[in-house]
Amino acid sequence: MDDGGEVKTMSNWKVNLYRPRIGPAEADAVAAVLRSGWLSAGAVTRQFEEAFADAAGVDDAIAVSSGTAALQLAVQALGIGPGDEVIMPSLSFVAGASMVALSGAAPVFAEVNGADDLSMSATDVAARITERTRAIITMHYGGYASALPALADLARRHGLALIEDSAHAPATMSEYGRLGTIGDVGCYSFFATKNLAVGEGGMVVARSPELRDRIRRLRSHALTVDAQARHRGSPSSYDVDGFGFNHRPNEVTSAIGLAQLNALASGQRRRQEIVQDYRRGLADLAGIGIPYLTRDVEHSAHHLFPIILPTEAVRAEFQNRLAEAGIQSGIHYPPSHLFTAYQQRFGYRAGSLPVTEDVCSHQVSLPLYVDLSPVEVELVIAAVRQAWGAM
Ligand SMILES: *Cc1c(COP(=O)(O)O)cnc(C)c1O
């Protein structure tokens, strides 16, 4: 799980790293689904897809069972497979890399920009393009837009697909437009820690109607049931024109998603306030880096509040001191290229991506969620100042 490796249970902390906001709207929506007797993907799921497409400013969206399922459908629908390479950041949750590896293609990890901007460097991506490259997966770290204009330009010039891993940025208006809708495919996650949280869930959007159609089919066993019903008037029979998954969501999670979507915009405003409080409260701490400080606070989903400490040893000590003060912190993320499976299969080593390794070993995430109270924000700021002062 990308839970930042926390060890204590929820009740032990004064301030948790995450807490989903679940209220009466979610409870009522779930109860209505249960009373309806229809549990598998149906009318509520379709409603969720339409509402999400609206919020993201696109024609249509495809609800799926997780963000990982969304990424797998994107990779499969684009026809990526053995012999292909896909360039992506190592500093991300490992799901995208795993889906590329499972397709038979090779993940090619690119560096991040640096300690001020934790998303992938377009310059480094350009240097890693080969004749085998088929796609670029970019990730909008913490809800901030990655280098989209430059990456879209590279993709266009080299005939590559651009996939946006927008797990951190649902329906987020960035400097460049809504995140997830600028490349060829956008993938979103509704895992319990994400801004739009249903427990397990996700969404895919795609620019081309043909690609959308392919994704929708692959979500459900590549059945051609719709075409069958249209052409022969016989919906009880069907054909299978590919090798598909069952990556459908269900009505319970879709109902939660609809309720969460209604509260997303107000939640974003609360997240912005918290980030402004953190920036103000920590600005004078020389030695603690705050990434994205020059970015307009309006243009991020603020999924994470990352800070950068001087060394790995200092980070460990700092996180211990925060824990002693009852403040849970996290790490986003350990670099994917150094996981055992990636070292063994793809030959990565410590030192393969020095900028990424440096940033990853110094990064800490502070609590950031809609229900974080002003008192809790002050507790975190005070704990950080005290922990830093004592180092
Ligand atoms: C959460 C996350 C995923 C995976 O989403 P799931 O819904 O947990 O499968 C993929 N990429 C990133 C960047 C994420 O944060």
Image (tube, grey):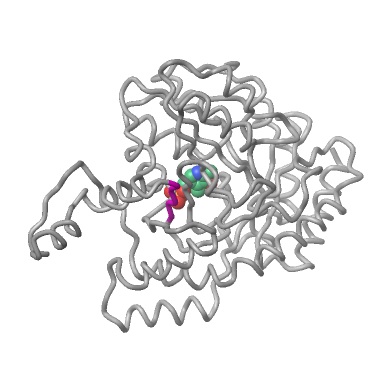
Which quadrant holds the C terminus? top right
Compare residues 209 and 6 and report the one nearer the observer: 209
Residue at left 51%, top 19%? 129
- Residue 380 in magenta? no
Residue bounds of the magenta highlight:
202-207
Q: Quadrant of residue 38?
A: bottom left
Residue at left 39%, top 81%? 31
Residue at left 13%, top 57%? 228
Compare residues 127 and 317 and report the one nearer the observer: 127
Find residue 122 and report its horizontal and vertical position in percent.
62, 27
Find residue 90 and report its horizontal and vertical position in percent.
55, 30
Q: Is residue 2 visible?
A: no
Q: Give the prevailing secondary structure in the magenta stretch.
A: strand
Q: Is residue 83 visible?
A: yes
The single residue placed furthest to the right in the displayed view is: 284
Find residue 202 and report its horizontal and vertical position in percent.
43, 55
Report how many numbered discs are placed on residues in the image: 0
**Taking 348 as reference, is 202 above or below it?**
below
- Residue 204 in magenta? yes
**Taking 278 as reference, is 43 above or below it?**
below
The single residue placed furthest to the front in the displayed view is: 231
Q: Quadrant of residue 342?
A: top left
Find residue 360 and report its horizontal and vertical position in percent.
64, 32
Residue at left 45%, top 70%? 256
Question: Left or right: where does residue 320 sit relative to residue 38?
Answer: right
Compare residues 93 and 202 and report the one nearer the observer: 202
Q: Quadrant of residue 124?
A: top right
